[in-house]
Image: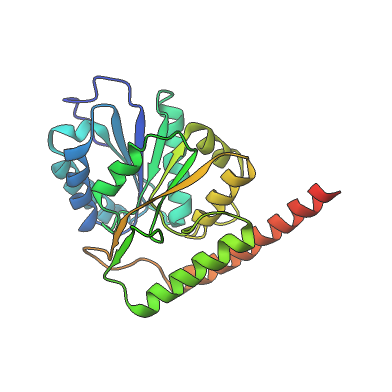
Amino acid sequence: MITRTSHQAVAPQRAIVIPAYLESDALPILIAELVEKMSDRDVIVVVDDSPTEIADETATRCRTAAGDRSSQVHIHTSGQRTGRGGAVRRGFKLAFEKWASVRWFVECDADGSHRAADIIQALEYSLPVDLLIGSRYLPQSEIIGWSISRRLQSRLLNVAIPRILGLNIHDVTNGLRRYSRAAVRELLDQAPVSSTFIYLTEQAYIVHRAGLRLSEIPIIFEERRAGTSSVTWREMKASLLGLLQITRLRMIANTSGAE
């Protein structure tokens, strides 16, 4: 963990949780950009599931990138890969329990596909919605660096899944989001169906089922700036199975509500 104490004189009110796996190239760049825009009331929680040697190297690079704000960056490693969803949950739990003062929790990708400017925009959004999603599919949004096939696949998923789950949002699979403390409490109180990327869908569904408010803002989404994607076909298969389980839970809930 990074322990320098030159900053963080005030109790943190906002936490940025970043799940990471094999991101020793891209993550330090993002950290450097974020600390330039952060205030003293912000903290970054990196949950790195990389093998120990790589995680140690990434932590060293992030420490250097953070500079005199290094006391606001907290890095936690496990040495075991738990999936993006599992890492996000651990990061939320750590921040939720460590800082009772934190009101807003942001999650984002470690690969640079979420710009620091958009992450801070989500963090500082003025309306007190419980789940704010940085959407790639609003009129002002933009996607940079994707092939036509990848755009089509993502667009189809983000049309079909919200309809299946009854969610009135345009982008249910993007990982740039801000949650209220009430929303994080709901997420932590429920055992996850999946720890893969489909957990993003599950999170939105849990918040929706709790009767909390959801909204979206436009962002510019860029293809990763360094390294290679850690998503495998095995994880894609597990994500699809997770979606089937979430759909089944919705059907059970609807049936129970009708009785």
Q: Is residue 145 visible?
A: yes
Q: Residue furthest bottom?
A: 149
User: Would you place residue 144 above or below residue 127 in this image?
Assistant: below
Residue 2 location, x and y as percent?
24, 35
Colour scheme of the picture: rainbow
Residue 133 location, x and y as percent?
43, 49
Q: Residue furthest front?
A: 139
Q: Which residue is more in the foreground, 179 or 28?
A: 179
The answer to whether 253 appears left or right of 140 in the picture is right
Residue 221's image quarter? bottom left
Q: Which residue is more in the foreground, 62 or 104?
A: 104
Residue 124 location, x and y as percent?
32, 36
The answer to whether 26 appears left or right of 187 in the picture is left
The answer to whether 127 appears left or right of 147 in the picture is right
Q: Which residue is more in the foreground, 21 or 51?
A: 21
Quadrant where the N terminus is found in the figure: top left
User: Residue at 22% across / 50% down in the picture?
Assistant: 30
Q: Which residue is more in the foreground, 228 or 38?
A: 38
User: Residue at 45% across / 74% down in the picture?
Assistant: 153
The answer to whether 67 appears left or right of 90 in the picture is left
User: Residue at 82% across / 50% down in the picture?
Assistant: 258
User: Residue at 69% across / 55% down in the picture?
Assistant: 250
Q: Is residue 191 visible?
A: no
